[in-house]
Amino acid sequence: MRRPPAPQSLDIARVLDTRRARGLVAVFDVDGTLAPIAPTPADARVPRGTRQALQRLARRRDTLVGIVSGRPLAEVEGLVGSGFWLAGLHGAMRRPPGGRVTRLWTTEVARTGALLARMLATSLRDVPGVMVEPKGPVVAVHVRAASPAGRARVRNLVSRVRPDRWSLLEGRRVFELRPEGLPSKGDAVQWIAAKRPGAAILYVGDDATDEDAFHALRRDDFAVRVGGAAANRERGRGRTRTTTGALFTLPDTTTVGELVAALARP
């Protein structure tokens, strides 16, 4: 099987030209994309300049701005501010600007998630640097501060306890359990893009869950993966560590901020 071509560096001028011709739906992941990866999720911050540029960008008539994250919506809004099309929990929570929150999971799924989170927290309480985060239908086990041995222990445990019809995804310093059929970031991008038919789509993300969004885009859209060799090492096992559906790349969150600023200029 032929290896897919490596992403090329994003040409911002090309994005601007496309926006002039068709309009743009610009959608961004948060952690590792707008915000640098922090020691804990609570420590993450979107730089002030990037936040301000996002607000300016959202006021443009030719651009619709969306934020898609694995975090709950309240945390997403706390990091980026209001006025955007928001999707949390990878697309399972959604809210249009000024609208109501929609939750796309069942009570049974939430109950299973809560039980899994409690069990994992008990089993991993003696592993330094590990934090279990219950997120309704998603259970995240963060290993940002864990040793390689601690990360291996987490991987083995979550693999063993994964329920039937639940999937396990290993991302950058995190393991996530979620029910099969839960909306993905690809679904969230399509929900946002449907508000601006015919516009080009720019999606910028850095992790394994962003691959769903990359694959939801067309060949003439802009699927952008953030990060270089260091980010690849943090993505864990599997194909998405070294291969991607993204056609373009940016090296780090600083250049993502520069992209947002360029898009927001008059």
Image (tube, grey):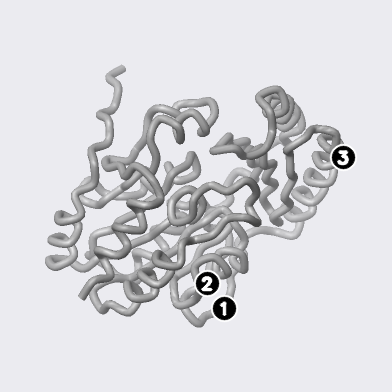
Question: Outermost residue toward the bottom?
Answer: 98
Q: Secondary structure at mark 1?
A: loop
Question: Which residue is the site of mark 2?
Answer: 95
Q: Residue at x 32, y 41 (%)?
A: 246
Q: Quadrant of residue 132?
A: top right
Question: Which residue is the site of mark 1?
Answer: 100
Q: Secondary structure at mark 3?
A: helix
Identified by mark 1, the residue type is Arg
Q: Is residue 150 left or right of residue 253?
A: right
State the image coordinates of residue 41 (x, y, percent, origin top left): 63, 52
Q: Residue at x 54, y 65 (%)?
A: 79
Tell me if label 3 and label 2 are in contact, CB under 8 Å. no
Q: Nearer the viewer, residue 19 or 212?
A: 19
Mark 2 crowd level (few <14, some 14–19, many ≥20, 10 Å Cα): some
Q: Mark 3 or 2 closer to N-term?
A: 2
Q: Nearer the viewer, mark 3 or mark 2?
A: 3
State the image coordinates of residue 61 (x, y, percent, origin top left): 26, 79
